[in-house]
Image (spheres, rainbow, N blue to C red):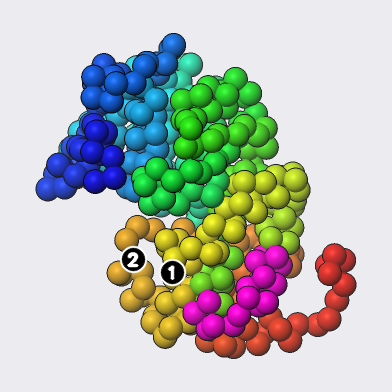
Amino acid sequence: MTNPKSKIRQARFASEAHPSDTLLCTTEEKTASDGQNLPPNPKSVAILGAGAWGTALANLAAANGHRVGLWSRRGSQPLETILEDADIILSAISMKGVADVVEQIKYAPISPETIFVTATKGLDPQTTCTPSQVWQTAFPDHAVVVLSGPNLSQEIELKLPAATVVASDVTAAAELVQLVFSSHRFRVYTNPDRLGVELGGTLKNVIAIASGVCDGLHLGTNAKAALVTRGLTEMVRIGNIWGAKTGTFYGLSGLGDLLATCNSPLSRNYQVGYQLASGQTLTEILANLSGTAEGVNTCQVLVQIAQQKNIVIPITEQVYRLLQGEVTPRQALDELMLRDMKPEYND
């Protein structure tokens, strides 16, 4: 265990035979076990999703002296129990599970002051909405905050330094979430561009698949640099049409997350691309993958949107064709390299 004193971490391992069990970690327990001082105004944080990312975030909040509850969709613990008196409800569940959980929570007695935080990176395949848009539609009178950045959960669990962004059009809500999760090893910035921060974390997953293919084919550093740079251009182009600010994509949640995901074998999306380049089928890869590679679904949704709005996204289109089995990795490379010549910025 990377953090043997963490009550959440202990519960996570102790309940492997019962992954449904929910931990309620009180501030008193954290003070007694870690010897830490409590924050001036400890908060009650309900974290939905007991995977690696949800657990990492739970540990960060608990280490700061906040009362944390960790809930799993596969568990037996009633959702209402963990939501009781929650100041913050943070969703770290995969995109495919967001709509169902939102429907369950809509009927729970939640304080009008409760802040919703989404740490999910994906797009709804039915509505093409981002996770925060799904939450905001269901809870229009609540503040919704997006948490996104170059945050590989395994590194955070090892207490390696990292930074992230919390974004909301309600400044006070973003600042509160910033205080809850900030520490000497996890630096949190605020940003008013909720959509841009969310799209950066979502769109880069498709480019990460392409990056994995690049490394799997051993195409070299020059090719990787060109791919990531042009991938960022696609991200900005899509984001601008959606209404996001260009500058946001050059921050932690855009370029930062892109660099981390495109260069680390810890990234599931990178692994999808790398293994496709190594000759495995998508079905085989996903069957053996621990967790969800959100880029696979996101790619399909993006192609649909691009066709409707006439957006030029050549890298995403080739990733889509590769995932569909229409081209081989080498053929996708050729398609990109043989596109019509053009100026770098007038496309």
SS for dot 1: helix
Q: Which mark is residue 197?
A: none
**Residue 297 % position (x, y):** 48, 62
Left/right placement of residue 97 relative to residue 189 reads left
Pointers 1 and 2 in contact (CB under 8 A)? yes
Query: Mark 1 packing: few (<14 Cα in 10 Å), some, or many (20+)?
Result: many
Indicate left or right for 42 with 314 as reference: left
Res 230 visible: yes
Residue at the extreme top: 40
Residue 22 point in image, percent of width and height = 22, 34
**Magenta region's main secondary structure?**
helix
Q: Residue at x 15, y 42 (%)?
A: 15
Q: Residue at x 30, y 69 (%)?
A: 288
Residue count near mark 2 (Cα–Cα under 10 Å), binned few <14, some 14–19, many ≥20: few
Q: Is residue 229 left or right of residue 329?
A: right
Q: Quadrant of residue 19?
A: top left
168 lies above or below 161: above
Residue 328 sits inside the magenta stretch: no
Residue 299 visible in this rendered orientation of the protein? no
Question: Whole-percent x and y of residue 270?
Answer: 48, 67
How far apart are the two marked residues, 1 and 2, measured between alpha carbons? 9 Å
Q: Which residues are magenta?
A: 215-231
Residue sitting at 65 percent across and 34 percent down? 191
Q: Where is 59 relative to 65, above or below?
A: below
The dot on residue 289 is 2
The circle drawn on residue 271 is: 1
Give the residue drawn at x 44%, y 66%. 265
Report which quarter residue 12 is drawn in: top left
